[in-house]
Image (tube, grey):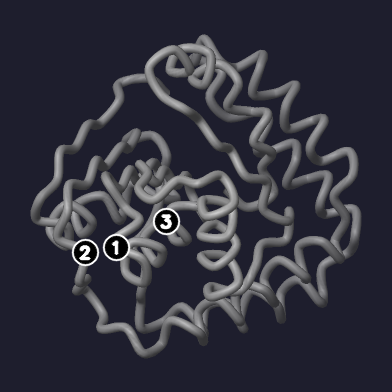
Amino acid sequence: GAMFNPYMWFYPMTKLKNDFRIIAPKLPAIGMGANDSVNYIKTILDTENVNKAIIVGYSYGGGVAQYFAEVYPDYTDILVLSHTGILRREDSITRTHRMLKKLKIIPSFSIQIIKFIRTMSGKESEWYSFRKAFFNWMFSSITKKDFVDHFNKNLIFFKEIQHLPVGRVSWKGKTIILATESDKDTFQYYGKLTSIYNNNTSHVFDEP
């Protein structure tokens, strides 16, 4: 996910490591272009002599995972999409330009307001203390420039996938779709994802 670190996933990794060989690549915090992202993952798999893998993507990483399955289906065993949106939307570039304009005019201290909002949500969750500590650590080094750079990388990403059809994918393999209803940013795309990926198993978590 954008601005996330693979170390955040140590808990599920410890639960799965006895059954799976896990590779958790660290993408640059500001993201990468679409082609650079999938080629980066393919290079890692080739280096590790892995010719087929379960590709897991969370949030921004879900977009990377979807594109990887489109470009390198032979490398993809199962596609797992967790709390993410659909790969191709007609308004992606327009919305990103709009966000960049907003970022240019907001003061730098607004980043701390974003951190406050992020760390205040999900208090009902058993993971709240961990989530708050993680976001405090993560935002301690993130600046307004990082956000601007991130959305500029998003622009590159969206431009590189413009050749893809809206609402259709070529990947027909097994897909697992995970969501949480309280995650308003991504749950709005849950229904669309389940309709796009016909061969899917889906699960909505009750946890906030």
Q: Which amino acid does label 1 sit on?
A: Pro
The residue that mark 2 highlights is 171
The residue that mark 3 highlights is 65
Q: Which amino acid does label 2 sit on?
A: Trp
Q: Picture coordinates of residue 171 (x, y %)?
A: 21, 64
Q: Picture coordinates of residue 92 (x, y %)?
A: 46, 78
User: Which callout, 3 or 2, points at the residue further toward the start of the chain?
Assistant: 3
| Viewer-closest of 11 and 51 | 51
Nearest to the eye among marks 1 and 2: give it. 1
Q: Residue at x 32, y 37 (%)?
A: 179
| Viewer-closest of 79 and 95 | 79
Q: What element carries label 2?
A: loop
Q: What residue type is labelled 3?
A: Ala
| Viewer-closest of 96 and 18 | 18
Callout 3: 10 Å neighbours few (<14), some, many (20+)?
many
Horizontal arrangement in the rendering, residue 49 relative to residue 194 (left or right) = right
Label ID, residue 73: 1
Callout 2: 10 Å neighbours few (<14), some, many (20+)?
many
In the depicted structure, whether residue 53 falls above or below residue 36: above
